[in-house]
Image (cartoon, coloured by chain):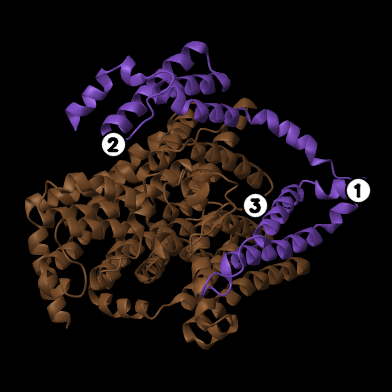
Amino acid sequence: MFDTIFVNLIDGFKIILQVKYLVYALGGAFLGTVVGVLPGIGSAGALAMMLPIILVLDPLGSVFMLAATYTGVMYGGSTASILLRVPGDTSAVIACLDGHEMAKQGNAGAALCIAAIGSFIAGTIAVVGLMILGPFVADLALKFSAPEYLALYIFAITAVCSLVGSSMVKALLAMVFGLMLSTIGEDFMGVKRFTLGITEFWDGVQFLSVTLGLFAISEVIINSESIISNKKKVVLKHKVFIKLKEIIYSFWSIIRGGFIGFIIGVLPGAGAGIASFVSYSVERQISKNPENFGKGEIKGVAGPESANNAASAGAFVPMLALGVPGSATTAVMLGAFLMLDIQAGPMLFIERPDVVWGLVAALYIGNIFLLILNLPLIGLFIKILYIPMALLLPIITIICMLGIYSSDQLTLSLYLMCIFGIIGYFMRSCDYPLAPVILGVVLGTRMEESFRQTMIMNQGNFFQIFDRPIVLIFFGLAIISIIIPFMFNKIKLNASDID
Amino acid sequence: MKLLFRYFFAKNNFLATIFLIILIGYFISSLYLEKTIGEDVVGPSSFPILVASCGFILLAIHFFQNLKLIDKDQSLNIFIVKKTFKKMAPIFLTIVFAYLFEIIGFLFSSLIYSFLFILYLKKSLRYSLLFSFIITISIFIIFFYGLNFRMPMGELVDTDKLFPFLEDIKKMIY
């Protein structure tokens, strides 16, 4: 079996190593990085923007360019999060926590380097996984039905809430707020809820308004406050590159992130956002210094950044093997395949091995280009931090406004961003973590759908889900994720009492 | 009564109290939703009720954890809110920007917004004017021409009619 895979992969490389395809892949990785930095576009939007361009290319070139763009967007998203605390996508939210803290401490270069290196290593792990495990994992993913997804979402929520911020109750309250927001609009049966008679709310609250409001606008308020109150800001000299010992220190986080990301990426609907959240919580759980997380811990960047890149490659498994898009991005990709007259599904491996293995090779090459392109560019990216705050703050707000407006052309979404900016400011002042709100908004709709489908499957008997082994595993993990931080706190309190 | 008021609006409880008020409204509204639809045995109201119930339990834990605040002479958070209100000027500016965004179009609204924002951040008039112009034009070129974004051109002041060459350049590019 491995011989066949190897031969196929060599064939894939023979195709992509033609100059014109290399140029397409390089162009895709570059454009992806640039577009990924801008908030509001996201990986699906970026691929959609590429559709008019790929129409003029040959089908293989189009597929390669899209694959490279995808890897570029995933990396670019974290750049804005790390430098400016402006996450453009769900998967980039977690980079705001430790990545931005590192930037504030003058370690922006190290954060960006580890994000690039992690993305490269984890991306490579995921591509190997896609090659070898793809068909098997896709089979396993098919065994996931509503109860398993519900258990997965509950685990993701408890894992994140038990670890983010100083108080678990506050984190869970923030998550409840996010879940409440997710119930606004039409549910999956078409029933309108909590819309306050506003038709624009039928589609729900726009994710970008919530994210950019909570993270970016609250940051703008806090920074302008410090300028007005004449707080002397220390001008930091940012390190452009990372130390070797920092790479070694984060190495296993990258590897773990790669595996976690790939497995979660394969599950349809789970996506890179959840992968990065889960990876962050795992890193903090097993860390010897969990108190450093949220204060600029490099592992808090390495793990999640690796996970989100690996998840994006993992999402190709159900798309290629089953013709089932696991995320909005792979849905756009599948649409592009249809435009190019390429039929994804089990027959694709037999009928168009050039596409499948060329794509795998393109992901490898895309990762390499990403590293080559981005490491030298880090110095340039860091220059953004030297722009005076008085100029940077209006630029951030205007870009956020454009990002939101471009996605739905609604002024209401702009007002919502301002409201969430105020909420975010107060939440930060009162020590409430922001990430659980985002997790609630992202998971709420899917969680409700899984919950109601589970209840339909079990004819109203919720406890029947515990007959399923995968559900039991996830619930066990959820309980462990709640208990462990409590135990750690107790041990720490006892230790401080003894001291 | 005053003690209770002080307790609920103490710094650590202030947001939780606001959230409690919202949660009560949310819970009551969810009771009015349909209970079941067809095969859907739990209906559209089930999840919001579940979420609200979790919220009430968590708030109860939160308020219980902070019971110690009831004895302390906590300054009312209302005063902190008043102080914070002053710091909110950038957000009010942003709301005005959002309001003007479609009415006078991106170019003018962005120019006014960035000018006022930079001026608010204690910069000189000349500096604010120069950089607001540079910021607006740079962002416009990157998004409108570089990324082919759809931008509001204005209803009251139609930038399209005022500067018809902007759209012509775009047509030349694409």
Give x and y (percent) for residue A485. Answer: 63, 69
Of residue A122 and residue B85, the one placed in the foreground of this image is B85
Classify residue A259 as left or right of residue A19.
Answer: right
* Tag 2: amino acid: Leu
Q: Which chain is brown?
A: A
Q: Amino acid at mark 1?
A: Leu
Chain containing mark 3: A
Q: Farthest residue in the bottom direction?
A: A467
- The residue to which callout 1 is attached is B3
User: Please, what is the three-letter code of the amino acid marked with disc 3?
Assistant: Tyr
Q: Is residue A167 above or below residue A380?
A: below
Estimate the x, y position of residue A395 in percent, counting from the top left: 44, 30
Where disc 1 sits, the SS reads: helix
Q: The chain shown in purple is which?
A: B
- A24 relative to B166 in the view: left or right: left
CA distance for labels 2 and 3: 36 Å
> In which image quadrant can residue A271 be found?
bottom left
Secondary structure of residue under mark 2? loop
Q: Quadrant of the N terminus of chain A?
A: bottom left
- Earlier along the polypeptide chain: callout 1 or callout 2? 1
User: Label 2, on which residue?
Assistant: B147
Residue at label 3?
A: A432
